[in-house]
Structures are given as C-alpha cells and as structure tokens.
Amino acid sequence: MTRMLTFLVVAAAAITIAACDTTGEQAMVPGAKYSMNVEDGRFHNIHATGQKLACETCHAGTEYQPDFVTLSKYADDGGASPGIVDRAACLGCHKAGGIATAWYGGRATR
Amino acid sequence: MVKFIRMIDMERCIGCRACVAACYTENYHTSGAPWNAVIEHEIGTYPNTGLAYMPINCMHCEDPPCKKVCDDMGAHAISKNEFGVVLIDYEKCDGCKYCAAVCPYGVPQYNETMMELYPGKGRTPYENVSDTDRHPTHRKKPKVMEKCTFCWHKLEKAVADGKTDRIGRDPEYTPSCDVVCPVNARLFGDIEDPNSAVAKGIGAKKATQIKKEYGTRPQVYYALVGGDF
C-alpha cells in the first residue's frame, strides 16, 4: 500500500514536472501548499525528490564564498539545514532558456 | 518619471553601522529579521590586508525574483510601485519563504516571533504603539516575511507633499540610513534627474549593481572595493 502511494506521489510529481517543461510559466498553481520544509514541503519535493538533486548540489558549503554578500550570512539556522545555499546553483535551471521557470532575468514582471 | 536609486560608496564606508542602527529605530526592528546589515570582507594579502564593508539592504530590483515567485503562487503579497519600490504586504503574505529562497541577495527575512526588544524586561512604550498608529510597513507580525522598504513611509510623504525634489536632501523625505551616514558613503535620489547627487555619484564613482548575472537589475549601486562581486 505504502509503495503504491509512493508510486502515485512520484508519478504525480513526474506529470507535474513534465507539464511544467512544456508550459513553462504555468508551473505554480495558485492555492497549492507552498513550503520550504524538508519533510513535506513542495520546494524540496520538487528539487530533491522530483529533480533528484543531492542536498549538496544546493547546500554546498558551511562557509560563504568571499563574494557572497547576503544578510542570511548572519541568520543562525541552528544547524537546521545541511549547508548554505549559493543561488548560483539555481541559475542553470531557472534563468531564461532553462528547463524551469525563469525567476532570473528575461521575463518582465507582471 | 521619478525612479529612486541608492548608491553606496564602499571606498568611504568605515563600517560604523550607524545606518543599521538608524534603520532599526526608524522601522520598528524585530529581532532576527534585519532590514539592513553590514558585511565585512577581508581583502588583500598579507602584509597588505584590510577590511571592506558592504552595507546590504533590499536592492528593489527592476525585475524582482521574489515578486515573480509570489505572483506565480497566487499570493501577490509583493508589489513594485511606480517609483520602483518593492514592498511586502504582511496581510497577504503566508510566510512560505519562497521569496527568500529565490532572492540572490538574501534580503527577505522571516519574522519567527515578535521578540521583546529587551527580553524579559517588558515592552517599551515604543513597542506598545498600536498598529493603527503605525505605517502599514511597520505593522509587524510574526510568521510573515519582511524587508527594507526604502523607507517608503518617508517617500510616500514626499509624494503626497509634492516634494519629490527634496528626496535625498531633506531628512524628512530621505531614508534614515542615508541620512545618518557620517562619511557620506550613501546617496539616495532620483536617477532620472541628471543633476541629482546620486546620478552624479554613480557616474563619478563608476558605481555598479551587484550579482548582475541574475538579471535582476537592482536599484542599488555600489562603488566597489576589494575584488569581484
């Protein structure tokens, strides 16, 4: 039963992602439950489970690059996350022409 | 059309954090959710070393990823107004943190709890000011995102008073961080006015936006010191 459910969830995720690839900007559906939680949050589901990205792909290090200027440098997450996320990891997929929604550049704000 | 721009001169900045203190006071700072911070970079190689200071607040991007993601999910809590100011509406925000996830500058801050300014010592009169007496951008509440507003409450007043030409000149109409800088490392004003101090400053110092590879087109310019940003 659990395996069946897992299969369904994965299949649904696959379909969603497949749909996103073609429709691009329609990826997010208003009203869905958005969350950064690792256990059940949509964000980590899409990236870690759906896209099969290893945690370290994004949570690269324990220290910021010298040029990584950000406020969260000082935000203490109490070791809750496996490492700091440099948004350079997002660019490949999320810039104009990438496989996912172009958060970065290229698209006018609506 | 008026478009507000800030220029930060790292050559002049001495890292005193007066801008941070001014921001905290002006904008009803809530602990754990800073709107302004100064980041230190060690530069040079021994024995010729030094520190460079980089004050960071919201870049008020022309193409803000935070707004895109918030709009796409249907929350529409983030707006960019006709003067280029990016604002978060606390009433519409559901605290999902996606704006923080996509911001390359680490700007949006999650306000976990409304901590007392002096923990255990009770609320100060300042904290007891009721929401109705505060500007909407200062009606802080827990479990939502917040960030720098370019002191929108002051700019809004300048617009209402028909005094936009005084922005960047009169303390009343200028963001507090820019007002207090003791070494004139911060300029604020209208980029469309070629005679504004900020427009001239950007030209003279060859100031630039940071992290341009993200295509966000920030409205904050830096005269950089110490390497490749």
Image (spheres, helix red, strand yellow):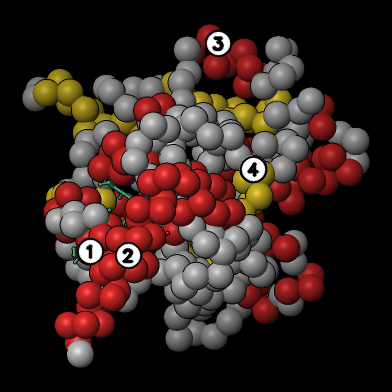
Quarter of the figure with residue A37:
bottom left
SS under mark 2: helix
Q: Are marks 3 and 1 in contact (CB under 8 Å)?
A: no
Q: Position of residue B32 (x, y in %)?
A: 42, 66
Question: Would you name the residue on which mark 3 appears?
Answer: B203
Question: Mark 2 against mark 1, which lies toward the viewer?
Answer: 2
For the residues beneath circles 4 and 2, the answer to whether they share a chain is yes
For the residues beneath circles 4 and 1, the answer to whether they share a chain is yes
Question: Would you name the residue on which mark 2 appears?
Answer: A13
Label 4 Cα crowd, 10 Å radius (few <14 / some 14-19 / many 20+)? few
Q: Amino acid at mark 1?
A: Thr
Label 3 Cα crowd, 10 Å radius (few <14 / some 14-19 / many 20+)? few
For the residues beneath circles 3 and 4, the answer to whether they share a chain is no
Q: Earlier in the sequence, mark 2 or mark 1?
A: 2
Question: Would you name the residue on which mark 1 appears?
Answer: A49
Q: Position of residue B185 (x, y in %)?
A: 51, 28
Q: Are marks 2 and 1 in contact (CB under 8 Å)?
A: yes
